[in-house]
Image (cartoon, rainbow, N blue to C red):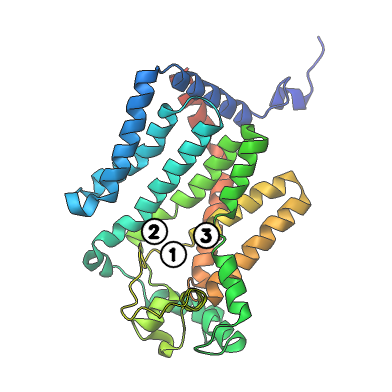
Amino acid sequence: MRRRSSHHRKRGPDHRSPLRRSKDDLKGAVERKLDSYGTGVRLAAGAAALAMVVVTTARKRVGLHPAATLVFANATPLAAAVAFPHGRLRYAAIAGGYMYAFKVSWELPYDNPERLRRRLLIDEPIRFDTWIGRGVTPSVRLQRALRTPGEVSLLDIAVTAVYGSWFLPHLLLGYLLVTNHDYVPRAGGRLSAAYHLTTPFYWLAPEAPPWYASEKEGRMDGELERVARAVVCKLFGRSTPEDGAVPGNPWGSMPSDHISSAAITAMGLGELGPVYGALGWSYVAAAAFAIVYLGEHYVLDVVVGLALAELVRRGEPLAAPIVRAAARALA
């Protein structure tokens, strides 16, 4: 009897790895299940998704418990998956629902700032960055070297534009959705994991970003400026808010979801080829410089964001048994 090659034994006749076969099985099982729903179920799911967005947005006014808020927010992309038939529109709806769920998960800890304040990290990240910067945090060093206090330069505007381009990984997903949507489930899953693994930190280890520690807490001799805010006020002719109020969660700083999402995208691009990988990691480097220079994040936040992206990459193959079990349950 002819002995099969080791490659055939590992990959099978269709040259797919066990993890890839498991993912394909799960994808097919989920899509068959979703496609079996009728029009009435889809309409109900769409209405439920809309209702969950409305209720979680108004959670403070209606007194919705944080646990219920998390359940409703994270159920939104699932309801969106049921509401739309198989195709690109379903992927887009799931992506929109997921990003809304992440937004709520990021904002929710700050709904009770008094309680969160008791765990707020202010000096700990400064000590780490001071050690990295050999006595002075990298944010302060960069602002001393590259800008004039109180002024907005072209460099400030350019770096703020890089900081504002956090949605580039999502644009890449959109490109895949149009050109080859078979790659979207894996790419979207990795990106979602890189985002959502940051959210427990916002509850357990809230951190004041460098600009907040400088402006509000007097750390770093109050020297560090929030450059991005100055740029926006300059470009739109606005005055700097006196109260310094910040929408969302000003203490949701560590780790940097900006870096974790960019890094996991760069890792995926690297699998396509060295040129794509170089482009991806160039953006990661530019984004890391931007958030540190602007005073939005510490170097510590960058390091932890990179570590989370690597955790997602290494943990992906370990998910194969769970994926296979889910596929068998849904089939």
Name the quarter where the N terminus is drawn: top right
Q: Quadrant of residue 78?
A: top left
Secondary structure under the numbered disc 1 in the rendered image: loop
Above or below 49: residue 16 = above
Q: Is residue 291 left or right of residue 250?
A: right
> Is disc 3 in contact with disc 1, using a CB cutoff of under 8 Å?
no
Secondary structure under the numbered disc 2 in the rendered image: helix
Residue 141: % across, % down: 56, 85
**In the image as oriented, which residue stretches furthest toward the front?**
237
Q: Quadrant of residue 39?
A: top left
Q: Which residue is mark 1?
A: 254
Closest to the camera, between mark 3 and mark 1, is 3
Can the viewer see residue 315 in this picture? Answer: no
Secondary structure under the numbered disc 3 in the rendered image: helix
Residue shown at 39% from the left, 85% from the top: 219
> Is disc 2 in contact with disc 3, using a CB cutoff of under 8 Å?
no
Q: Residues within 10 Å of mark 2 (few under 14, many from 20)?
A: some
Closest to the camera, between mark 2 and mark 3, is 3
> Is disc 1 in contact with disc 2, using a CB cutoff of under 8 Å?
yes
Q: Which residue is mark 2?
A: 201
Q: Residues within 10 Å of mark 1 (few under 14, many from 20)?
A: many
| Disc 2 to disc 3, C-alpha distance | 14 Å
Of callouts 2 and 3, which one flags the residue occurring earlier in the amino acid sequence? 2
| Disc 3 to disc 1, C-alpha distance | 10 Å
Q: Is residue 55 left or right of residue 255?
A: left
Q: Is residue 274 left or right of residue 314?
A: right
Q: Amino acid at mark 1?
A: Met
Of callouts 1 and 2, which one flags the residue occurring earlier in the amino acid sequence? 2
Q: Amino acid at mark 2?
A: Phe
Q: Nearer the viewer, residue 271 or 132?
A: 271
Q: Which residue is mark 3?
A: 258
Can the viewer see residue 158 in this picture? Answer: yes
